[in-house]
Image (cartoon, grey):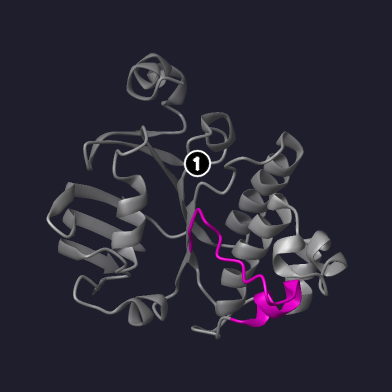
């Protein structure tokens, strides 16, 4: 048995006195794409934030390649090769596109070069000197992901990257996920857009009330669609 890249066991999380995660369990193998599904408020984003140590209090176990991280600070977790792309993107308006790209430090070996990033995201090359918030929503999303790729992260936590974007941009992001997977990246996605997520993921975790209640593979997807309609309203 190989050690999973990420393993979450009996994870509980709190914001202040609000208990939002209630024993989350799942694992992600190296090179996998896993999608967390669920209605708003199911605990998907809180799970991502807990993995990165960005939640108020967390208890349980979160191991990265066998290393326990539950008591680690966020910067130490990142140095294990994790990169988090939050839904709000976090593009700095006072910096150009390329300055935003260059801002995060390298945290691990093997990060993409700027030239490799521009080859993957030609739009960013064209907009390199543009103010960060003058980029389109799709370009800002590409920039938010590209920043992580420079750092050397190999496990990408992508939160609602297709949210509010035009279908043509969503298709480009799908192509990006496929390309990154081929390059050996491990990806955990939170997605409300099931049409976007369905063909990309190896496995799906359905969350409800702060816990994983169903898990199934890409091959099992056709037989689970009726239940998914019940859980997600998709």
Q: In the figure, 77 relative to 28: above or below? A: below
Horizontal arrangement in the rendering, residue 67 relative to residue 32 (left or right): left
Which residue is rendered at x = 39% and y = 77% of the image?
80
Which residue is rendered at x = 27% and y = 59% of the image?
7
Which residue is rendered at x = 65% and y = 44% of the image?
174
Q: In the figure, 172 relative to 49: above or below? A: above
Q: Nearer the viewer, residue 194 or 86?
A: 86
Q: Is residue 143 visible?
A: yes
Q: Nearer the viewer, residue 4 or 122?
A: 122
Q: Is residue 1 visible?
A: no
Find the magenta span and give its range. 85-103
Q: Residues within 10 Å of mark 1 (few under 14, many from 20)?
A: many
Image quadrant occupied by the N terminus: bottom left
Residue 105 x/y as whole percent: 55, 85
Q: Nearer the viewer, residue 141 or 35?
A: 141
Magenta-drawn stretch, dominant element (helix, strand or loop):
loop
Answer whether residue 163 is magenta in the image.
no
Residue 129 x/y as whole percent: 83, 75
Horizontal arrangement in the rendering, residue 30 relative to residue 8 (left or right): right
């Amino acid at each position: 048995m190989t050690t999973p890249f990420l393993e979450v066991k009996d994870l509980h999380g709190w914001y202040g006195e609000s208990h939002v995660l209630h024993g989350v369990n799942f694992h992600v193998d190296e090179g996998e794409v896993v999608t967390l599904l669920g209605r708003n408020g199911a605990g998907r984003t809180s799970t991502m934030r807990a993995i990165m140590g960005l939640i108020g209090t967390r208890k349980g176990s979160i191991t990265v390649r066998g290393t326990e991280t539950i008591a680690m600070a966020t910067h130490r977790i990142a140095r294990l090769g994790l990169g988090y792309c939050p839904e709000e993107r976090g593009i700095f308006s006072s910096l150009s596109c390329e300055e935003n790209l260059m801002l995060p430090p390298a945290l691990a070996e093997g990060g993409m070069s700027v030239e490799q990033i521009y080859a993957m995201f030609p739009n960013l090359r064209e907009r390199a000197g543009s103010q960060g918030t003058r980029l389109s929503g799709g370009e800002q999303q590409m920039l938010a992901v590209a920043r992580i790729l420079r750092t050397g992260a190999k496990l990408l936590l992508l939160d609602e990257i297709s949210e509010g974007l035009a279908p043509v941009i969503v298709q480009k992001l799908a192509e990006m996920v496929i390309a990154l997977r081929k390059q050996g990246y491990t990806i955990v996605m939170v997605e409300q857009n099931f049409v976007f997520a369905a063909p990309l993921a190896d496995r799906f975790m359905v969350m409800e009330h702060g816990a994983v209640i169903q898990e199934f593979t890409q091959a099992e997807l056709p037989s689970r669609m009726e239940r998914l309609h019940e859980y997600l309203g998709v």
